[in-house]
Amino acid sequence: MHFRRHLLAMSMAAALTQLAACGGSSSSDSTPTPEPPAPEPTQSLSGATADGYLVNAQVCLDLNNNGECDADEPSTLTQAGGQYSFEDLDATLDLNQVQMLVKVIAGQTEDEDNPGVVLTQSYTMTAPAGVVEFVSPLTTLLASEMDRAGVDQETAAAALEQTLGILGSDLSLVEDYIVGKQQQANGNGYKRLHRVAQVVARVTAKAKHAVEQNGGTGGDAEDNEVADAIAETLTENLERLVNRVDEAEANGQEPDADTIADEVADELPLAPEDVQDRVERKRERGDLEEASLLTLLESEGGMFELDGHSDVFFDSSTNQCIKERELGYQQIQKVESLITFNRFRYDGPDVGFIEITEEEDRDMLVWKEAAWAEMSDQVEVVSQEEDGSVIVSSDMDGRQQVWAQQLDLSDLKLKRYAKGEHEWKSLFSGNQLFPEGASGYQMTFKQLESRAMLPYRAECDASVQWCNQVVLPTGPVQTLAELMNDASTEAPKLVYIGGDDGTSLAVALQGSIEEDQGKVQLYVVEHGECDDNGCGAPELKENADASWTKTPMGLVLNLPEWGHSFTHRRRAQPLLTEYEGAVRHGFVLGEGLTRSDQWGFNEVAMDAFLANLGTPELREVEDAEECGFDPDDGQDPGDGTEPGDGDDKPAPPQLIADDAATAALAGKLYLAVDAEFQALIQLNEQGRVMAWVEEQDDEGMERETLHGEWLIDAEHRLLLQFGADDWVLMQLPAEGLGGDVMKVFEQDGDEQLEYAMQLVRPLSLDGFATSLTFRLTDEDENGCAMDLHLDAFDTGLEGSGWVDMSQCSEAGDGTVPANQEFLWAQTEAGLKVQMVPSSNEMAPESHLLYWFGSQTTERVLSRSTTMLADGTAMEGSLDTFRFELLP
């Protein structure tokens, strides 16, 4: 019954529906059910954040761009893999204008690079507006560069990419580098970017922590301003940081982010007071406005740029710390279609600034019209763009686009805006202000075409100095084909393309010069290991992604990112080219390179600089600390057991090399002998020096091998520099420089040493009979006499023999055998005698024999070396003998 009632109800409902559809009506009105309102449209976004992936970091959408995560802004915490997501965002929100903000929270956030370890220091990261899928230390630098230089994301990215050495590659600063490390083609590149990001994050955290520990910056800087100031400092100094990462990798080390960060943080202006100063500058720079560069250059005074530098050194002759400075500026104007440069130099308080009329010495060639040509100083204005920028063309830089942003300097500090020129900046006080009408201009330069350059000086004398020629052990190289290596090449032909005092980078070109491209093998050479054949054993860097490309200019070298830390030209590619009968080193500036580190000033601002400069001296006596020692420690500069000992050694004097004096010593070997030490000093033609030193102290004889650089000036002052605080300054004679025997004066603290340097020459068998016996009598008190018998030899290059030591006391007491066999070989360095051990317990010992002193006196110097069981060489003693030819 109930089931029937249900069917009846359904039938009636169907009938009523039919009636309504036909326009009929029922006996009672019905009220329709209202439809629910449509939901508001929304959107979502997701991404990740990393130094390594960060877990439990706060991420927010900084909608008002105040650098803070405000309570009314969408916010979340990151999950595993640094992941974050935002749901139900307002659909009208333009994500292309949204700036992400990441807050790393001390005691809460974890870095998956170190799983399970909670970070102890807080810091903030961000990204350019619209970059919402990945936030990292690198995107933070990118946003900072856009703000600092006032440029768009593409231009800012190009500037950072060139510093990182990745401009033109497939690597991106806004991509997840941890994911990128898995790529086959770009994995190594992204691995390197991850290392750089790790160091940036740690330096940022250290600087932020220092401000917190200080209770602030000492001023009124807000947290967001502190974060911006730290990021800007790192952006400006990124190359220094990247070099540290690359040097570690090149030396075969896994770059340690904490160690590198500690070093970099100590070197950069990141102290709380430095951060406050940058905050104030950024506030002032917020008033930068786009300016017409041509309008400025066409004005009555034009634009002015500052120039200057200084050298600080310890003058051992007066025992004073000396500062020598150079100051200058240039006036830049547009005359018709050309940019003109009028240069001025400060000539001291009595003269002031004078105009420089002589042509600037370029010592540089440029590739144009399919040949190397001399460089013109002419800069031509090509066009003015709608945005106020100017296209210019010159031999030096090719076509460039230049923007200018104007800042009203009225009532701002002169000291702060002597931009980039520390020597000017140091001469102003903090209360000297610009007058009304003073303006500064921050300029941005973008390279619109590639440019090839060749350092070259026609009058360079290759017999005296390095003249930009590629030299192999066989001699100077004339053609690129001579540099090529193939499967038949026994020892690689290495071309050194860069480096510093400690490490060099060499390349071995593979393939045929007939091909358009080929592989390049990279070798790193540590100069700490020196012998008679040079310094360091080249170490092949396996799997280094390097190649060469043939161009009309020569061979362009395509290096991995870390390789550019050796060339010191991150904005350029190395080039090997043929010119004037020799293969030489050049470089290519790439298209798209951008820099924003140059400031100019209008005439009112320049007049203010000059009016407040005063009359500085060109040479001044500085505080002791400027030369690297503390006057309160009770020590004089250079105190120690020998020159260079201790942390109080002053900076070495700044000498100017003299060509004639250099030629007199280059390639020579000298023995310096004093009552307490003797040193064998090799001065090679490339400015490198090796010294084998023996010094007697209370504990016995101490021996060491040093390596470094040498330089001699017109006053015959010879500087041997083995490190920043390890150097020796010798005064050589005015007459007889480079002779057999020279009298030397050396200032060692308050004591002046006087000793002789005697010329050392290879002991050669030329002119002797085909068999030879000679006696070497030790010049010490023992007077040991050894008779060396060289068996008959035909080639004069090698042979065997034996030594009779029966007249020596050591033979009498049994410590050495009375007779011992040896092998000998004639080398370019001298006569090498290799002892044949009489038992397995004896380590093989060799002696290199030289003539030394006056050629009229037959004296022999022996330098001994012992080969240890692990294959390393241990330097032995330096011994001198009288020479006597026996019948």
Image (tube, helix red, strand yellow):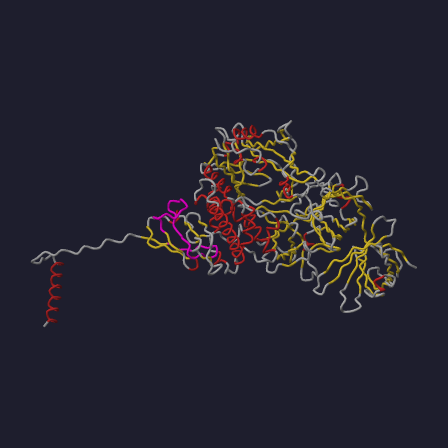
User: Residue placed at 56% from the left, 29% from the top?
Assistant: 612
Nearest the viewer among 94 and 62 is 62
- Magenta range is 45-74
On the image, the x and y values in percent for residue 410 come to: 48, 31
Q: Is residue 72 magenta?
A: yes
Q: Extreme bottom residue here?
A: 1
Give left or right: position of 580 versus 179.
Answer: right
Nearest the viewer among 13 and 787 is 787
Nearest the viewer among 635 and 598 is 635
On screen, 298 above or below 5? above
On the image, the x and y values in percent for residue 633 come to: 64, 44
Q: Quadrant of the C terminus?
A: bottom right
Count of marks placed on residues = 0
Q: Is residue 646 magenta?
A: no
Quadrant for residue 337, please give it: top right
Q: Quadrant of the N terminus?
A: bottom left
Nearest the viewer among 642 and 53 is 642
Give left or right: position of 135 versus 311.
Answer: left
On screen, 752 above or below 25? above
**Please, what is the dominant secondary structure of the magenta stretch?**
loop
Quadrant for residue 399, please give it: top right
Q: Extreme right residue here?
A: 887
On the image, the x and y values in percent for residue 516 come to: 61, 54
Whether residue 308 is visible here, answered yes or no, is yes
On the image, the x and y values in percent for residue 432 come to: 52, 31
On screen, 3 above or below 887? below
Whether residue 155 is visible here, answered yes or no, is no
